[in-house]
Image (tube, helix red, strand yellow):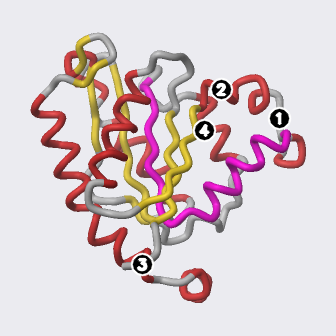
C-alpha cells in the first residue's frame, strides 16, 4: 500500500491534561505501528469558544471548518469522549451535528471512551455506536473503554488496557487497509 491513510482523531475531552487524549494517542500509536498514516488530531477542548457559539455550519470560524472538512474527507476516524451523565459530551455531539449527514457513509470509525469506572463501559454500545450508525459509518467491531483505574495520573499504566488497544488496532487494520485501497470515486459510488 503506497497511500498513507488519512486518519482524523477526535478527542472529546474538554480540558488538559486529558485521559481521553492519552487514550486516543495510544490507539493512534498502535495503528501507526502497522499502517502508514497522516493524522489530523482534533482536541475538542481547544474548540470550545468557537464551536460552542455556532448553531449552524455557516457560523463556524475557518479553523473549525478545517476540522469539519478533515472529518468529512478522512479515510477513517478514531473518536473518543469522556462519559458525562451516561453519554458523550454535549460539545462532542455538537461537533458531529455540524458534519454533513452523508459524509461518513461506510467510513471506518474506531470508537473509544473514558469514564470514572467500568459502570460507564457500555457508552460505546449505547451512545457512540448509534450516533455513527445514523451517519451510516462502519463502526469497527472492537471499541476501547478506559476507566480511571487504567491510569496513574495521566499515564496509561494498565496492561489489560494496552492489550485491548492492541486487539482493537489489530482487528481494525484489515478494514483500514481495504478502505485505503478504495479511491474517493469508489467510495462515492458505493455511497449512492
Q: For marks 4 and 2, give the one nearer the viewer.
A: 2
Tell me the quarter of the image containing the N terminus. bottom left
**Secondary structure under badge 3?**
loop
Instruction: Choose the circle earlier in sequence order: 4 or 2.
Output: 2
Please name the residue that numbered disc 4 is placed on.
93
Instruction: Choose the circle earlier in sequence order: 3 or 1.
Output: 3
Please name the residue that numbered disc 2 is placed on.
46
**Secondary structure under badge 1?**
loop
Q: CA distance from mark 4 to mark 2?
A: 15 Å
Q: Residue furthest top?
A: 153
Please name the residue that numbered disc 1 is placed on.
54
Instruction: Choose the circle earlier in sequence order: 2 or 1.
Output: 2
Tell me the quarter of the image containing the C terminus. bottom right
Instruction: Choose the circle earlier in sequence order: 3 or 2.
Output: 3
- Residue 75 vertical position relative to residue 117 in the rendered view, above or below: below
Q: CA distance from mark 3 to mark 1?
A: 39 Å
70 magenta-colored: yes
- Residue 17 vertical position relative to residue 171 in the rendered view, above or below: above
Instruction: Choose the circle earlier in sequence order: 3 or 4.
Output: 3
Q: Residues within 10 Å of mark 3 (few under 14, many from 20)?
A: few
**Quarter assignment of residue 184:** bottom right
**Secondary structure under badge 2?**
helix
Which residues lie in the magenta part? 61-83
**Secondary structure under badge 4?**
helix
Q: For marks 3 and 4, give the one nearer the viewer.
A: 3
Residue at screen point 18% across, 48% down: 166
- The circle drawn on residue 2 is 3
Q: For marks 2 and 1, give the one nearer the viewer.
A: 2
- Residue 16 vertical position relative to residue 21 in the rendered view, above or below: above
Amino acid at each position: 500500500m503506497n497511500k498513507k491513510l488519512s486518519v482524523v482523531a477526535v478527542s472529546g475531552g474538554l480540558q488538559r491534561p486529558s485521559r481521553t487524549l492519552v487514550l486516543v494517542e495510544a490507539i493512534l500509536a498502535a495503528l501507526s505501528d502497522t499502517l502508514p498514516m497522516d493524522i489530523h488530531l482534533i482536541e475538542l477542548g481547544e474548540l470550545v469558544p468557537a464551536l460552542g457559539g455556532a448553531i449552524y455550519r455557516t457560523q463556524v470560524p475557518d479553523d473549525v471548518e478545517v476540522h469539519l472538512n478533515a472529518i468529512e474527507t478522512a479515510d477513517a476516524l478514531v473518536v473518543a469522549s469522556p462519559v458525562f451523565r451516561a453519554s458523550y459530551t454535549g460539545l462532542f455531539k455538537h461537533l458531529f451535528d455540524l458534519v454533513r449527514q452523508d459524509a461518513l457513509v461506510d467510513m471506518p470509525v474506531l470508537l473509544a471512551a473514558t469514564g470514572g469506572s467500568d459502570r460507564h463501559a457500555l457508552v460505546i454500545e449505547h451512545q457512540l455506536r448509534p450516533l455513527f450508525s445514523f451517519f451510516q459509518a462502519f463502526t469497527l467491531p472492537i471499541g476501547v473503554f478506559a476507566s480511571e483505574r487504567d491510569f496513574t495520573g495521566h499515564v496509561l499504566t494498565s496492561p489489560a488496557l494496552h492489550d485491548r488497544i492492541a486487539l482493537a488496532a489489530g482487528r481494525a487494520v484489515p478494514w483500514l487497509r481495504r478502505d485505503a485501497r478504495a479511491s474517493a470515486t469508489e467510495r462515492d459510488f458505493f455511497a449512492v
